[in-house]
Amino acid sequence: MADAASSHVSKPDGATGVLVLADGTVLWGRGFGAVGQAVGEVCFNTAMTGYQEVMTDPSYAAQIVTFTFPHIGNVGVNDEDLESHVDGAVGCVVREDVTVPSNFRSQGTFGDWLASKGKIGLSGIDTRALTRRIRMAGAPNAVLAHDPDGRFDIPALIKRALEWPGLEGMDLAKLVTRSAGEEWEGGAWTLGKGYARSPRDARPHVVAIDYGAKDMIFRNLVKAGARVSIVAATTSLSDVLAMKPDGVFLSNGPGDPAATGEYAVPVIKGLLDADMPIFGICLGHQMLGIAAGAATTKMNQGHRGANHPVKRLEDGVVEITSMNHGFAVDNTSLPDTVEETHISLFDGSNCGISVKGKKAFGVQYHPEASPGPMDSFYLFERFVEMLK
């Protein structure tokens, strides 16, 4: 219905939804899901599957996801593919109207599910043009709105998009973390049987700090042979150590790592001083980098999708990975005590580090996938083996 170069505000017939960028660009479409407004940063995701996992990934908090794959919603939704029960993306933008689902696992439609979660959808958008705009000019702040009657105050929406401060400097981990500790019980998934239970035997004990974690990460730690306890993002160093972990996991999450790092990095530094084995993913990787003396930076459009090539520097192997991040460790800022272990083959940005003299490493990408390839599961096995 609209392309990403459109800046007119006259509403076409049948438009029940709109995406208004902070620069005044107005993209008309057809709203679905929840009715209302949502403000956030517009990003794009290149995965062809896993839209339900994407929409429930807490790392997408305060973001509007543009799906580059045109047929979103075609396999419906189900209760097993949720990555969390906290807020993820505030809404999504898609090319084609959502059709009646066709999949034997479907328990409902994507639109109804979005409405139940309070998330807004917008179809009929030229997502290819919008993606090119984001790649060229960076991820914009915007307001996504849906009104079945097609009534929109465009100047007010532009004003709201302009006044939203953006993700840089924003700590979102406190909004999506668990408020209390939890003994994780889920294991690997099997068709027809669901998720297995985590064995409670004498396995290596991992304390996972939840900055906005995907549940599949914990399931993969269990699959690799660990017993997992989860604590909130603001848990103190003394409380973590009191749980007598064999190792500590630093989870993914949304927002600016420098902002979350104001309370998280001192804890991570204390864990490094205690020679605690550490494994960090995404936001956890970035804050491990800060704790080890590096800096982080905001990316132009970020990396999001299930098809990102990453080179492992120790042997030159290329892993096809799943990614979701708008910040990165600045590999020009790495001190001599930190080794770069992985780089993106798209732009050369940092995708992995290890701290010399410590059992501490992190990766920028998501080895648990969901959606995405399973090339990097070995990292969970490598971490758990370190704990034995």
Image: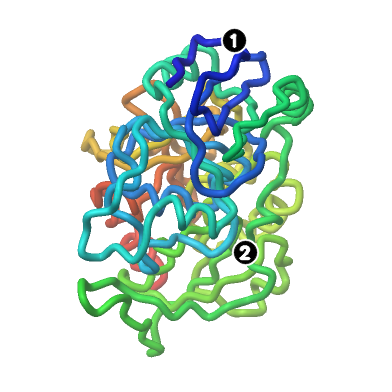
Residue 342 visible (yes or no): yes
Q: Residues within 10 Å of mark 2 (few under 14, many from 20)?
A: few
- Amino acid residing under circle 2: Ala
Left or right of residue 292, residue 96 in this image = left
On the rendered image, what quadrant is the N terminus found in?
top left
Quarter of the image where one finds residue 47: top left
What residue do we see at 54% from left, 66% from top? 208
- Foreground residue among 53 and 20: 20
Structural distance between the alpha carbons of marks 1 and 2: 59 Å
Q: Percent position (x, y) of residue 48?
A: 28, 40
On the rendered image, what quadrant is the C terminus found in?
bottom left
What residue do we see at 34% from left, 42% from top? 72
What residue do we see at 29% from left, 76% from top? 194
- Foreground residue among 91 and 286: 91
Q: Percent position (x, y) of residue 15?
A: 52, 28
What residue do we see at 59% from left, 53% from top? 118
Q: Which residue is mark 2?
A: 274
Q: Percent position (x, y) of residue 19?
A: 57, 27
Q: Percent position (x, y) of residue 180?
A: 67, 74
Q: Which residue is mark 1?
A: 8
- Amino acid residing under circle 1: His
